[in-house]
């Protein structure tokens, strides 16, 4: 037995020596062959064998058992032989612990993932040829009898596959796709640590666009490179979403090629994915999503399948308002909310999950500047869903107001919320008349709408800067400044300021001149128009008591009116004698309340302006004396009748002294009194006006805005209205540049007056025609009787008194 054992040892040693000698060129035909023998006995492998010898790998191949060697033929090394930097790794060509026999393979694709440096994709074609990692086998199933192994000749080298990062860049460039996945993975530097011996399911760009919006894609991929620089909770949320996304498409094993009928495998998030294969393993289905033609692709540590519509990525990220803000490049705005501890405004509220709100977010260029105060941030949020295109469906709706989340901040508004105003014009939507809404269609996430605006919305400030300079309120602001009430005292209720603007002062120039001479009246007017409490133009009907700035208790009544779809607010103040018209949507917000620009001047009851006051203001004092000569005209000047006066300047009256002392003075004065019903026509130069004399005047307006008065159906002469003003009783005074002359009146009344009855008119015409006919008959008869008489000297002289046109010839008459 001992001799037998040593004999076996000797034969084994002898066989190894023989194999080695064969590898160095021996041509002896020994019955025991190894993998190296096969390589040396086939000249097609001579280059590969030389590479193996050069790298000292002969002993390594001789020592291996139970393995498969892929041996490139000589033609595979044509290019690499010329490359001095060519690297060779025998592990690229080895399958450990497995002897591959291709003759028994079925048609289709198989994946070899065990015992290899990287996955092998083995494809058996219908002509029984075999391809491994895109390299065709040209001589397969060469089996040594002294080793449990197999050798397969292949027509090319098997290079180490690209690393995942390089692999993704290559397919992105070659196929012009996968841009979004590449952008996503570039922000995951640790991706190489989670892909070893795993399968990755890569969504194409179409998959992203089919499943996510552009905003959502921008957030996931950090398209604006803003999230990478964030810290704290903001960065943690984004990192968590990225990790969840990548782990959702990675399986912790190599899967590809032909699979069992159905295979359930967990992804790295622990979710079950259902795998199936079709078309001999070239197509893979994952949860119903079909892989594209780019499947079963190898990278250095695993396998890749691409999909045109990878549905499993749909629920990987739970999108919130915060994430949408990142997706529209407003990360600075989010950062400010966290800094001011207001991040709950952009998170799902557990206490009120159905809360509706709208956010007006400044564009990134403005958000990156000065920063925000807590109040400033709150002012960008509205307690409602504001669909602009629905809010302004009607053409007459030009402005609407909404309450912001800036409530009870410093109690300047009495605990109510500060509002924002949105106006619509031909250029779009504007907030507080300054900030343009960039996108009219909002982004919607849950119950929140998001609009981008052109700039950071500034909080309403002090009174003066809050007034629109185009509203013409400078005169009122000047009075407030002179009265030292631009800075209103804190009243914990807020204020409503009724401010005469536009041309309300200049429209009644005489009133302005009168009031400017009376500081007490100005003080009373301005302080009566500032009241405690905030009243907006969209306020509902209500009645309440409050105080004005004078400290007087007043009763306030609001009444909303709808005129042809246009709403207005009538404001009744017990301290003012008439209803104050507030235009809808002209509200101007300031830190302590709201300003309503008024289109006319409303005098409080405490301020009285009489007709005599206005006449004195014109400087035409003599006219008052003239009116006082007549009892009925005296009552017009000093009474409360609804007449208005046309007052010529004192200078112009001096040129008509003769008329003022004549019997025609009474008529002249009555011609300058306008009946009260026509005052409005004259104020706005619309229509004709009737005078106390009974004659009518017409008003016209030239291109410069000047008003001119003339006598209707009279001489084409006129006077210019220089100034106007109205008393507390609504009687008005119009200063004109000269008197209206009585000579301009058309006083030629016809002696013939027709009856008004139609039958009488017919009878009258018949009678008139008959009389005319008889007159003509007798006239002709008389003329015929005298035509034959001789002309006397007197007749000749008479004929010479008239010229050829029937006018008196004065020269002839004088000669006669």
Image: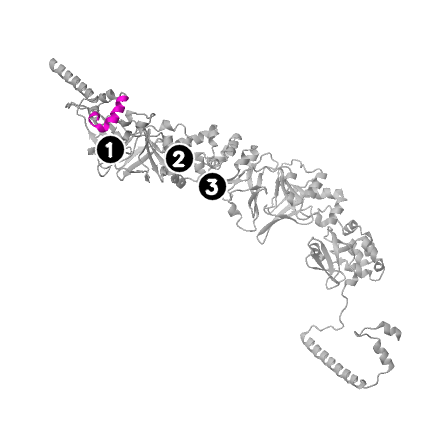
Q: Residues within 10 Å of mark 2 (few under 14, many from 20)?
A: some
Q: Residue at x 60, y 35 (%)?
A: 411
> Which of the labelled discs sits on residue 615, or is there none?
none
Report how far apart the C-alphas of labels 1 and 3 lie in the structure: 57 Å
Which quadrant of the structure image shows residue 245? top left
Report how far apart the C-alphas of labels 2 and 1 lie in the structure: 34 Å
Q: Nearer the observer, disc 2 or disc 1? A: 1
Q: Upstream in the sequence, badge 1 or badge 3?
A: 1
Magenta residues span 39-54
Marks 1 and 3 in Cβ contact (< 8 Å):
no
Element class at badge 1: strand
User: What residue did someone put label 3 on?
Assistant: 444
Element class at badge 2: helix
Which of 277 and 60 lies nearest the eye of the viewer? 60
Which quadrant of the structure image shows residue 517? top right
Query: Is 50 covered by the magenta stretch?
Result: yes
Report how far apart the C-alphas of labels 2 and 3 lie in the structure: 25 Å
Residue 351, horizontal then vertical, whole percent: 47, 35
Q: Nearer the observer, disc 2 or disc 3? A: 2
Which of 450 and 95 lies nearest the eye of the viewer? 95
Residue 99 seen in this snapshot: no
> Which of the labelled discs sits on residue 181, or is there none?
2
Q: How crowded is mark 1: few (under 14 residues within 10 Å), some or many (20 or more)?
A: many
Residue 611 seen in this snapshot: yes
Left or right of 766, for residue 205:
left
**How many numbered circles does the render carry?**
3
Q: State which quarter of the image contains the C terminus.
A: bottom right
Q: Upstream in the sequence, badge 2 or badge 1?
A: 1
Q: State which quarter of the image contains the N terminus.
A: top left
User: What residue did someone put label 1 on?
Assistant: 137
Magenta span main SS: helix
Q: Upstream in the sequence, badge 2 or badge 3?
A: 2
């Amino acid at each position: 037995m001992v001799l037998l054992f040593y004999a076996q040892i000797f034969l084994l040693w002898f066989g190894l020596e023989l194999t080695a000698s064969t590898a160095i060129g021996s041509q002896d035909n020994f019955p025991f062959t190894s993998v190296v023998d096969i390589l040396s006995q086939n000249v097609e492998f001579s280059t590969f064998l030389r590479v193996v010898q050069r790298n000292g790998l002969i002993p390594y191949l001789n020592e291996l058992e139970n393995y498969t060697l892929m041996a490139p033929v000589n033609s595979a090394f044509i290019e690499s032989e010329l490359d001095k930097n060519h690297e060779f790794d025998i592990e690229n060509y080895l399958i450990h612990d497995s002897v591959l026999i291709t003759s028994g393979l079925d048609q289709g694709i198989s994946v070899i993932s065990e015992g290899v440096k990287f996955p092998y994709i083995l494809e058996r074609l219908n002509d029984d040829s075999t391809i491994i990692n895109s390299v065709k086998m040209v001589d397969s199933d060469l089996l040594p009898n002294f080793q449990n192994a197999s050798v397969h000749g292949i027509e090319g080298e098997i290079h180490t596959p690209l690393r995942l990062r390089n692999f993704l860049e290559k397919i992105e460039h070659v196929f012009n796709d996968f841009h979004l996945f590449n952008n996503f993975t570039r922000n995951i530097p640790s991706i190489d640590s989670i892909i070893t011996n795993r399968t990755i399911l890569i969504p194409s760009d179409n998959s992203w666009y089919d499943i996510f919006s552009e905003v959502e894609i921008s957030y996931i991929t950090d398209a604006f490179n803003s999230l990478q620089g964030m810290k704290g909770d903001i960065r943690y949320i984004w990192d968590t979403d990225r990790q969840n996304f990548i782990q959702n498409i990675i399986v912790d094993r190599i899967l590809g090629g032909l699979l069992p009928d159905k295979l359930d495998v967990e992804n790295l998030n622990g979710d079950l994915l259902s795998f199936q294969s079709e078309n001999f393993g070239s197509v893979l289905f994952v949860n119903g999503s079909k892989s594209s033609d780019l499947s079963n692709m190898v990278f250095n540590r695993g396998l890749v399948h691409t999909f045109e519509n990878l549905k499993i990525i749909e629920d990987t990220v739970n999108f919130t308002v915060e994430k949408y803000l990142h997706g529209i490049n407003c990360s600075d705005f989010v950062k400010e909310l966290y800094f001011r501890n207001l991040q709950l405004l952009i998170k799902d509220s557990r206490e009120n999950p159905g809360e509706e709100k709208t956010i007006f977010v400044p564009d990134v260029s403005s958000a990156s500047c000065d920063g925000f105060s807590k109040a400033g941030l709150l002012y960008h949020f509205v307690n409602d869903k504001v669909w602009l295109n629905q809010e302004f469906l009607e053409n007459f709706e030009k402005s609407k107001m909404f309450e912001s989340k800036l409530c009870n901040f410093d109690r300047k508004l009495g605990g109510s919320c500060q509002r924002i105003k949105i106006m619509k014009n031909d250029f779009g939507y504007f907030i507080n008349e300054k900030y343009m809404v960039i996108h009219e269609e909002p982004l919607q996430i849950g119950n929140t709408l998001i609009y981008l605006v052109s700039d950071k919305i500034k909080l309403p400030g002090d009174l003066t800067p809050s007034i629109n300079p185009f509203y013409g309120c400078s005169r009122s602001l000047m009075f407030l400044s002179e009265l030292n009430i631009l800075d209103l005292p804190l009243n914990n209720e807020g204020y409503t300021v009724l401010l005469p603007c536009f041309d309300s002062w200049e429209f009644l120039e005489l009133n302005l001149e009168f009031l400017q001479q009376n500081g007490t009246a100005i003080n009373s007017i301005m302080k009566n128009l500032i009241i405690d409490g905030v009243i907006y133009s969209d306020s509902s009907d209500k009645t309440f008591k409050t105080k004005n700035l004078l400290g007087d208790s007043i009763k306030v009544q609001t009444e909303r009116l709808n005129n042809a779809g246009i709403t207005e607010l009538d404001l009744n103040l017990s301290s003012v004698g008439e209803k104050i018209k507030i235009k809808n949507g002209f509200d101007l917000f300031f830190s302590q309340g709201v300003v309503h620009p008024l289109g006319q001047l409303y005098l409080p009851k405490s301020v009285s302006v009489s007709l005599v006051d206005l006449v004195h203001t014109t400087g035409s004092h003599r006219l008052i004396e003239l009116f006082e000569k007549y009892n009925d005209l005296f009552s017009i000047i000093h009474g409360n009748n609804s007449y208005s006066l046309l007052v010529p300047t004192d200078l112009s009256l001096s040129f008509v002294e003769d008329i003022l002392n004549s019997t025609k003075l009474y008529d002249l004065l009555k011609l300058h009194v306008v009946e009260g019903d026509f005052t409005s026509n004259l104020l706005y130069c619309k229509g004709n006006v009737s005078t106390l004399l009974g004659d009518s005047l017409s008003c016209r307006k030239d291109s410069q805005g000047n008003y001119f008065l003339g006598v209707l159906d009279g001489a084409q002469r006129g006077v210019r209205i220089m100034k106007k003003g109205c008393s507390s009783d609504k009687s008005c005074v119009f200063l004109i540049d000269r008197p209206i002359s009585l000579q301009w009146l058309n006083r030629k009344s016809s002696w013939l007056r027709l009856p008004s009855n139609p039958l009488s008119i017919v009878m009258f015409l018949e009678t008139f025609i008959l009389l005319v006919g008889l007159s003509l008959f007798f006239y002709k008869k008389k003329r015929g009787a005298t035509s034959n008489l001789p002309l006397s000297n007197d007749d000749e002289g008479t004929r010479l008194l008239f010229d050829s046109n029937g006018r008196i010839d004065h020269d002839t008459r004088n000669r006669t």
